Image (spheres, rainbow, N blue to C red):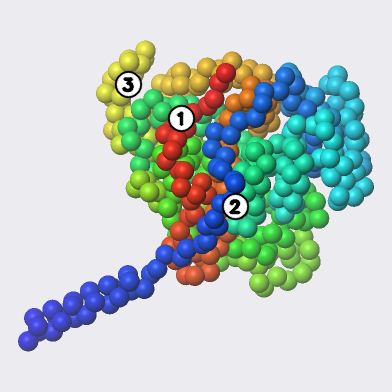
Amino acid sequence: MKRFACLLMIACLLMTFDLNAQQVKMIETAVPERPAGQRDALQLTAPPMKTVRVGFIGLGMRGPGAVERFSQIEGTDIKGLCDVEVDRVEDCQKLLEKLGRPRATGYSGSTEAYKAMCDRDDIDLIYICTDWVHHVPLAVYAMEHGKHVAIEVPAAMTLDEIWLLINTSERTRKHCMMLENCVYDFFEIATLNMAQQGLFGEVLHVEGSYLHNLDDFWTEYWNNWRLDYNMKYRGDIYPTHGIGPDCQVLNIHRGDRMEYLVAMDTKPYNGPKVVKKLMGQECPDFQNGDQTSTLIRTVNGKTMLIQHDVLTPRPYSRMFQVVGSDGYASKYPIPQLLFRSEMLKDTESPDYQNLNAHAAMPDSLCRAMLKKYLPPFVQELEEKARRVGGHGGMDFIMDYRLVYCLQNGLPLDMDVYDMAEWCCLGPLTRISLENGSAPVAIPDFTRGAWDRIQGFRYAFK
């Protein structure tokens, strides 16, 4: 009798589990039909331009650095400087003079001032460094007036904005690139090259994050826009630094695509305290949790772990990891590599013979491997990039590659679909969280062309 009761209980549990599994349904979001007469922008190119003529919008935290970097790239002409505050424009004019560049035309005094700059016919590229919520209207206006656009991260905050940028780029045949600098950091580029050379075997899992305590920075954001966004919206609202390098390693929309995600967050503990400290008011409905974690599965059975945390005292980390069938790489808190010994037989160092399956390879071999696998174009740029700067040099490499591709009529390293895939975590994680961490389908932003190109590659003339 007891055995029968036990079996009956197990059967009931299994039935309950099966019912619960059936109740967990994938949440879908609409993929709008491509407008008639419009085609995808994969491998989009534009006629080569000997000189890239650029105008900058937003000269607060990121803009001046971009102006300084472009001033030190050959074949560029800085035509316009735009900000709502006139003193910021003047500061960048002085920066141009200091670097031996002529003053540009200044635009300021109004939130509509950028339109006059975009209306000009002697500018090729609009470089947008404003707050998040103004990225899309500026970019759309610029593309519709014949300009390529480069947009700071995240380029778009909602699915409607993402689709608007995609459709505008496809229709106008203008580049729409997000300025994701972390894909150009030296460790990430070397690791990507290792993956492309097969050192990891098959890459199975990747991790990325933005863990950055912003206690020292909240007051630097114009009109408090960044804290305001965290107050109003739940989810991973700043995912691109972590997910960008991961997607390149996994060849997302170049042979694989992200299929669905599941998100989970903590309660908002520190957020309301920051509001109380900086604004002197209570905020019982603060939306964003102190930490958000997102798991993603791809069509080809790979997994990704992405985290966002700007409110706790965790040390800075982008948590970059690559886990393959035959190798491993991790950047934080210290650079680490480990490969099966047979993957390293062609290395010049004998240290590979002493690899321990339970520990990373010796630091000396790790440094040698990272240096060896820097692509040739990065080796050529490294000294100047580190001297010019911008997050250790990766910003300079990013801008250099943008200019190089435009000058030579080549596809950009990051296209409008990279922008879409890396930004979509914001709205999609919010949907998952607001539905009890339900799985949410990730749209195919290429609308069927995600496997037409096989493998991520840099373009060269």
Give the image location of residue 76, x and y in percent. 76, 23
Q: Which residue is mark 3?
A: 344
Q: Which residue is mark 2?
A: 35
Measure the alpha-carbon separation of dots 3 and 1: 15 Å
Give the image location of residue 336, x and y in percent. 43, 32
Give the image location of residue 349, x and y in percent. 36, 15
Measure the alpha-carbon separation of dots 2 and 3: 50 Å
* Residue 241 sits above or below residue 5 on the image: above
* Residue 114 sits above or below residue 308 on the image: above
3 with respect to 432 (left or right): left
Quadrant in the picture for the N terminus: bottom left
Question: Which residue occupies 42% across, 34% down?
Answer: 454
Q: Which residue is mark 1?
A: 191
Of mark 2 and mark 3, the one earlier in the sequence is: 2
Amino acid type, mark 1:
Thr
Question: Which residue occupies 85% across, 26% down?
Answer: 96
